[in-house]
Amino acid sequence: MKKKNRIVATLLGFFGPLGTLYFGWRVMLLNFLSFFMVTIITIFAADGTPPSWYQYVTAAFFMTWSYFFTDVHNGIAENGRDKSEILGFIFNSALAYLTKWGSRLEPPAI
């Protein structure tokens, strides 16, 4: 595994989950799945339409996530560990993000 550049990862993160192709197709696939789940939750929470600011928040999230994920990727690459550790990190961080975000939703008023 080759080390990745933080600046390149951050700039590609602007394009959302597509920018994570820089880390590999498996990383991109898991990010698309987590992005899809968060988008579905957001649409249901917003009564059928995502808020107008949603695209900006997701771009900022993926830029930040790519910046910090570069450290994880480079650490695993330097230690010569298996790539499956990266996929486990992505899946766990996506679940943690969904849980944290989903816990802030309030049930609709009756």
Image (cartoon, rainbow, N blue to C red):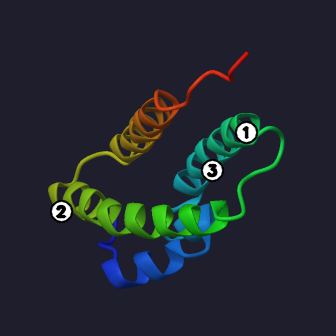
Q: Nearer the viewer, residue 101 or 87?
A: 101
Q: Residue at x 71, y 55 (%)?
A: 51
* Mark 3 crowd level (few <14, some 14–19, many ≥20, 10 Å Cα): some
- Residue 58, percent from left and from top: 57, 61
Amino acid carrying mark 1 in the image: Ile
Q: Identify residue for label 2.
A: 78
Q: At numbered mark 3, what does the secondary structure look like: helix, strand or loop? A: helix
Distance Cα–Cα, label 3 vs label 2: 24 Å
Q: Nearer the viewer, residue 9 or 102?
A: 102
Q: Secondary structure at mark 2?
A: helix
Q: Mark 1 = which residue?
A: 40
> Which mark lies nearer to you, 1 or 3?
1
Q: Which residue is mark 3?
A: 29
In the image, is 29 to the left or to the right of 75?
right
Q: Which numbered disc flags the more N-terminal residue, 3 or 2?
A: 3
Considering every residue shown, the one lying at the far top of the view is: 110
Q: Where residue 47 sits: x, y (%)?
A: 80, 38
Identified by mark 3, the residue type is Leu
Residue in the picture at 31% in, 45% down: 82
User: Residue 108, image x and y in percent?
Assistant: 68, 23
For the N terminus, give its image quadrant: bottom left
Foreground residue among 78 and 45: 45
